[in-house]
Each structure stands twice: as structure tokens, then as C-alpha cells.
């Protein structure tokens, strides 16, 4: 039996501090609106305010990477009117919010299969990324038309395109060979995952990168999320013991 490690997940981050990378599935906009007899789209509009609050709160707490799932590769299945409104909100946010991000030292990045968006939206994304690329207090990643399976597949395709010789020698492929080709290769793996809205599933978010992430679920609907809810999640996170396969005693001796 092997005694050495072949896992690419090695480091033991300190959980005593704020998480370095927080990844959030912003869920529950539709139910928030339904509860108030409002159209689902009203929930998305309010959801934008929660994004603003969360970005600011993460900045104040020293989080370095915040990743928000805004639109999944499966969300195209929603009614066309809802999809159009989500696209409009995305365009509006890119038009109106970038100056504020710059003031806060936030670098914006968008990951996902962006080819599906129209050229106006793609242009705005490109421009916002360019205007913030010198900033580093917090890196805000918006996952748009993103799917974890898409990410693994596109990484594999790009890896093989760059190293065609590996196709004939698959045994030489290891986990860390894929990492530089993943859409979020610039960030460490998430320390804390938060899903609002009460569902306890990953919904094809960062499936590769969440392998050892602490998973936190709250019933709070996304439009109600803010600094206080973030602090609750951080409090819970601080109480976790991240073992990465080791024993509790090994960690104490570390
Ligand atoms: C999350 O809220 C927003 C997106 C998926 C874009 P939902 O719209 O999924 O809200 P629920 O889950 O139906 O309440
Ligand atoms: C996940 O939420 C995607 C986003 C928040 C963008 P969904 O509401 O689409 O997930 P399911 O369908 O409940 O799994
Ligand atoms: Mg949902």
C-alpha cells in the first residue's frame, strides 16, 4: 500500500482568522419575492443590494477572494423573461458599480463560458476587468454561465492542447497539472462555502475546488443576507477543525 501522498490538497490553513477565500451560492431570490407576493424578478433586483453589502463586509474583514455564483450554466432553462432580466441586471451592475469597486480597491474578474453572452455584455466585462486589474485588496469573482463540470472539461481540453504528448502518456497526468487551466487558477481553493436559501447542494458550482472547503448552509434568503449573516458564517468557520485527511492529534502537534 502507498504511504506517500498523491493529493494536491496539502496545506493546513489557519481557521482562527477570517477565511482567505469565500465562495457563495446566492440562492433564494425567487422565494424571497414570492413570500411578499412579488414577481421573482423583484427578488433578483433586491439581491443586487445584498451583493453590494457582502462585497463591502468582506473587504472590511480582510477576505482576499470573494466568489459569487450569479448565473449557472443550467439557469438558461428558466423562463426567457427571467433570464433577460438577470442579463439586464448584470449589464447595469457593470455600468454603475465599477467606480465603487475601484474606490474599495476591488479587482473584478468574471469566470464562465462567456461566449454565450452578447457582445455588449462581453465588452462591459472586459472593460471592468481591465479597469480594476491593478487592484488587489479584494478579488471579486463573478461566476456567470459557469458550471463546475464545464470548468474541469475546459481545463482538460486546454491542458491537452498545450501538452499534446500527455494524451499518449496519461499516467503522467496528475492533479496539479490541471490546476493552472481551471478558470480560477489565480485564487487559492475556497476556505468557506456559503449557500443561502436553505438548499444543501453544490448545484455544479466549483466542484473541483470545493474538495476540502468548509460548507455552510443558511436558510436566510439571499436578499436578506448582509454583514451580520456573514459574521455568523465566519463564527461557525472559526470553530471548524480542518484536517485534510489527518487526525486531530496530528494537527495539535503541528
Ligand atoms: C438565486 O435565486 C439567483 C439565481 C439563480 C440567478 P433563485 O432565483 O434561484 O431563487 P429561488 O431558489 O427560486 O428562491
Ligand atoms: C444555483 O442556484 C445557481 C446560482 C445561485 C447562480 P439555483 O437556484 O439555480 O440551483 P438549484 O436549481 O436549486 O440547484
Ligand atoms: Mg434557487
Image (tube, rainbow, N blue to C red):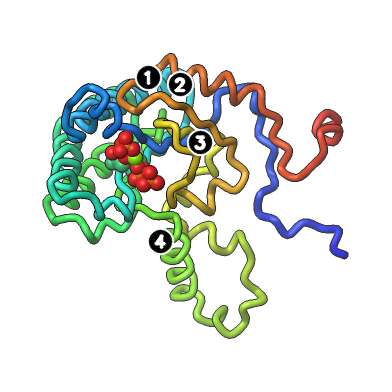
Residue 184: give x, y in percent of width and height.
Answer: 44, 50
Q: Is residue 179 left or right of residue 242?
A: left
Label 1: which residue?
226
On-image quarter of the N terminus: bottom right
Q: Mark 4 falls on what kind of element?
A: helix
- The residue drawn where x is 46% and y is 21% is 230
Camera-side residue: 96 or 207? 207
Check the image and report above or below for 117 versus 137. below
Residue corresponding to mark 3: 193
Relative to 128, say whether 234 is above or below.
Answer: above
Mark 2 and mark 4 lie on one chain; the one further toward the N terminus is 4
Q: Residues within 10 Å of mark 4 (few under 14, many from 20)?
A: some
Locate the C terminus by quadrant: top right
Quarter of image, ligand 1: top left
Label 1, label 2: how far apart the Cα atoms are: 6 Å
Task: Confirm or deny contact between disc 4 and disc 3 (CB under 8 A).
Answer: no
Q: Quadrant of residue 214?
A: top right
Residue that label 2 marks: 230
The answer to whether mark 3 and mark 1 are in CB contact below 8 A is: no
Q: Marks 2 and 4, how far apart in space? A: 29 Å
Can residue 194 be seen here? The reply is yes
The residue that disc 4 covers is 150
Find the distance from the CA under tag 3 to the CA under tag 1. Answer: 15 Å
Query: Which dot marks residue 217?
Result: none
Amino acid at each position: 500500500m502507498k504511504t506517500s501522498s498523491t493529493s494536491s490538497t496539502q496545506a493546513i490553513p489557519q481557521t482562527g482568522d477570517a477565511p482567505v477565500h469565500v465562495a457563495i451560492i446566492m440562492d433564494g431570490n425567487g422565494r424571497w419575492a414570492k413570500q411578499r407576493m412579488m414577481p421573482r424578478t423583484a427578488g433578483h433586483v433586491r439581491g443586487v443590494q445584498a451583493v453590494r453589502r457582502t462585497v463591502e463586509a468582506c473587504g472590511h474583514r480582510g477576505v482576499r477572494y470573494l466568489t459569487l455564483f450569479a448565473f449557472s450554466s443550467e439557469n438558461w432553462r428558466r423562463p426567457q423573461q427571467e433570464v433577460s432580466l438577470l442579463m439586464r441586471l448584470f449589464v447595469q451592475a457593470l455600468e454603475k458599480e465599477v467606480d465603487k469597486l475601484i474606490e474599495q480597491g476591488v479587482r473584478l474578474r468574471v469566470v464562465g463560458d462567456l461566449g454565450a453572452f452578447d457582445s455588449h455584455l462581453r465588452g462591459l466585462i472586459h472593460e471592468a476587468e481591465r479597469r480594476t486589474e491593478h487592484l488587489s485588496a479584494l478579488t471579486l469573482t463573478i461566476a456567470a454561465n459557469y458550471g463546475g463540470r464545464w470548468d474541469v472539461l475546459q481545463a482538460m481540453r486546454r491542458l491537452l492542447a498545450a501538452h499534446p504528448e500527455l494524451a499518449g502518456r496519461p499516467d503522467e497526468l496528475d492533479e496539479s497539472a490541471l490546476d493552472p487551466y481551471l478558470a480560477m487558477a489565480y485564487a487559492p481553493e475556497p476556505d468557506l462555502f456559503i449557500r443561502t436559501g436553505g438548499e444543501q447542494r453544490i448545484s455544479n458550482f466549483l466542484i473541483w475546488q470545493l474538495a476540502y472547503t468548509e460548507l455552510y448552509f443558511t436558510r436566510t434568503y439571499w436578499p436578506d443576507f448582509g454583514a451580520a449573516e456573514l459574521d455568523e458564517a465566519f463564527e461557525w468557520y472559526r470553530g471548524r477543525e480542518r484536517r485534510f485527511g489527518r487526525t486531530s492529534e496530528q494537527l495539535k502537534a503541528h
